Image (cartoon, helix red, strand yellow):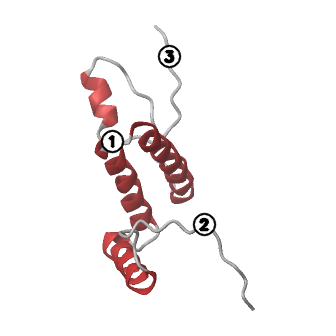
Amino acid sequence: MAVRTVNKLVRDRVPGIILEGGEMPSFRILDDGEFLSALNDKLQEEVAEYLESGTMEELADVLQVLHSLSELLGRGERELEYFRSEKAAERGAFRSQVFLESIDDMR
């Protein structure tokens, strides 16, 4: 019997899915500090996967990690959306596709 080392955060139902597939998962529940670190690692992983594939499915994975981070930080999705919309109202979004090339100091 071969053991594969994974050592990464997975979605809640993954251990059950592994069991249903006839394999035995070994896992533990993280404390909040470990969870924050694992979520940050997962965010980097999901962003890299999105950048490689460019798919909406991978972008949705990035969004799920962001939602989990906002919940862990005690804020939740609503507050995350509030901060996003406030910043968009104050500084704009990216709808106009503006790419700033340089700034001349005219003082």
Residue 10 lies, with reference to residue 36, above or below; the image says above
Kindly identify the residue that appears in the image at 40 percent across and 69 percent down. Answer: 94
Residue furthest toward the bottom? Answer: 107
Mark sitting on residue 55: 1
> Residue 46: percent from the left, percent from the top?
45, 44
> Residue 44: percent from the left, percent from the top?
53, 47
Mark sitting on residue 85: none
Mark sitting on residue 3: 3
Residue furthest toward the left? Answer: 20
Please indicate whether residue 16 sits to the left or right of residue 80 in the image. Answer: left
Task: Quote the CA–CA distance across marks 3 and 1.
Answer: 31 Å
Q: Amino acid at mark 2?
A: Glu
Residue 64 lies, with reference to residue 96, above or below; the image says above
Kindly identify the residue that appears in the image at 53 percent across and 24 percent down. Answer: 5
> Residue 81: percent from the left, percent from the top?
34, 74
Task: Quote the CA–CA distance across marks 1 and 2.
Answer: 28 Å
Task: Quote the CA–CA distance across marks 2 and 3.
Answer: 51 Å
**Nearer to us: label 2 or label 3:** 2
Disc 1 to disc 2: CB gap under 8 Å: no
**Nearer to us: label 1 or label 2:** 2
Residue that badge 2 annotates: 101
Query: Mark 1 vs mark 2: which is more N-terminal?
Result: 1
Query: Mark 3 vs mark 1: which is more N-terminal?
Result: 3
